[in-house]
Image (cartoon, helix red, strand yellow):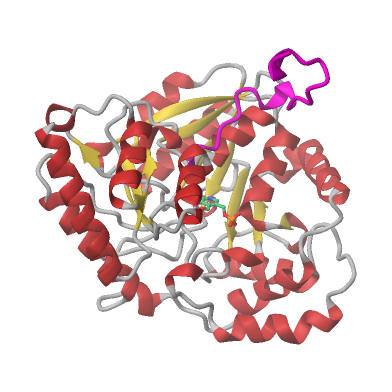
Amino acid sequence: MSSTGDPRQIRQSSKLLDVRYDVRGPILEEAQRMEAAGHRIMKLNIGNPAPFGFEAPDAILQGMIQHLPHAQGYSDSKGIYSARTAVSQYYESRGIRGIGVDDVFIGNGVSEMISMVLTALLDTGDEVLIPSPDYPLWTGATTLAGGVAKHYRCVEEEGWQPDLEHIESLVTERTKGLVLINPNNPTGAVYSRETLLGMVEICRRHNLVLMADEIYEKITYDGAKHLNAAGLSDDVLTLTFSGLSKAYRVAGYRSGWVAVSGPKHRAKDFLDGLTLLSNMRMCANVPAQHAVQVALGGYQTIDDLVLPGGRLLEQRNLAQRRLNDIEGVSCQPAMGALYLFPRLDPEVYGIEDDEGFVLDLLKAKKILVSHGRAFNYEDTDHFRLVTLPSVEDLGIALDRLEDFLADWRER
Ligand code: PLP
């Protein structure tokens, strides 16, 4: 009997049928097989700073080490008091009113809070407006929660700013929320005040929850100014997501939060649901919660990495310039975050299967990037690379990419 016909097969839940997270999908498995066979792969696929030689500020490590002996028990399920106070005070210092200690939920990374919020918010068939391209957890977690992801366009020629008219046109009576990712993964866009005000206004008009994923808020380049969406209104329920993985380079600690602002009195039922889900998983990893107060409370800055001469800026500059120098490749400047999302002109490259393209690149040149459709982008002419490797390593990777693309053009 074939294994598929065997009634004793243990199957995954049908809830997972349409759930996708292709940035860690089959391509990564192929890379792992190649590594096991002895190949050295240059991994430009995941925004994980530590393996690229970025170190967390020492105070964060010391803070955690000091607290370790006292972090053995469960904490309050919304998080330890010092971490929630630090988050509340941080937003207050940014001019955002009304985020009290009880409005902060600390999680095992932003990822956990995204899943919990969507599970608490959505009924089957409820719709969420999500950017295309997106950070794909937003789409995957919406689907898993029984919701429907409706993707709105971001306009490449306008530095990937969201298309407000398109957002508005997607609103139906089932729409519950609007997601923005700013600075954006994968495009590097930093949204203008005008764009953000437009998004807030759409939420106001249609009573939508605004979900602002601002995990890259401190990573901006060339003077780009990040604005917290929560600071732009008092009357729109806004959930601000952020954490320590990127700006503080401790992705492995799994520490993030969601902060609630706006008309909370209208959201009591939803917030009770979120509290229930928090209670059900006891609490976030307690030692890592102690890092939050040190990170937000002390003098921790990322300026030495993103200002002129800074490593992240230099790497972004090199990758952006080298990509734009390749025939048929164009890449909007990344004004923030850790990624570039270049376009391969269909007239020149004619890529029909972007996943196949990325797989061929991996096999031929031992470079791992992510295909555009993994980010719920509908065309097959983009890919994402991370700008975390050193200038030397990025140079090697881009030499190889350039060779590969030259061969592809000859095909
Ligand atoms: N949101 C965005 C936009 C991200 O890019 C990432 C990670 O890459 C996350 C959330 C998840 O972050 P965390 O490590 O806090 O779970």
From the viewer's perspective, tell me whether residue 232 is left or right of residue 244.
left
Residue 50 percent across, percent down from the top left: 50, 70
Q: What stretch is highlighted in magenta?
A: 1-23
Front residue of 126/101: it is 126
Q: Is residue 102 magenta?
A: no
From the viewer's perspective, tell me whether residue 161 is left or right of residue 262.
left
The answer to whether residue 370 shows anywhere in this view is yes
Quarter location, residue 154: top left
For the N terminus, give its image quadrant: top right
The answer to whether residue 192 shows anywhere in this view is no
Dominant secondary structure of the residues highlighted in magenta in the image: loop
Front residue of 19/402: it is 402
Q: What residue appears at the point 59 percent right and 48 percent down from the top-left corner?
A: 234
For the C terminus, give its image quadrant: top left
From the viewer's perspective, tell me whether residue 379 is left or right of residue 10.
left
Q: How many labels does the image show?
A: 0
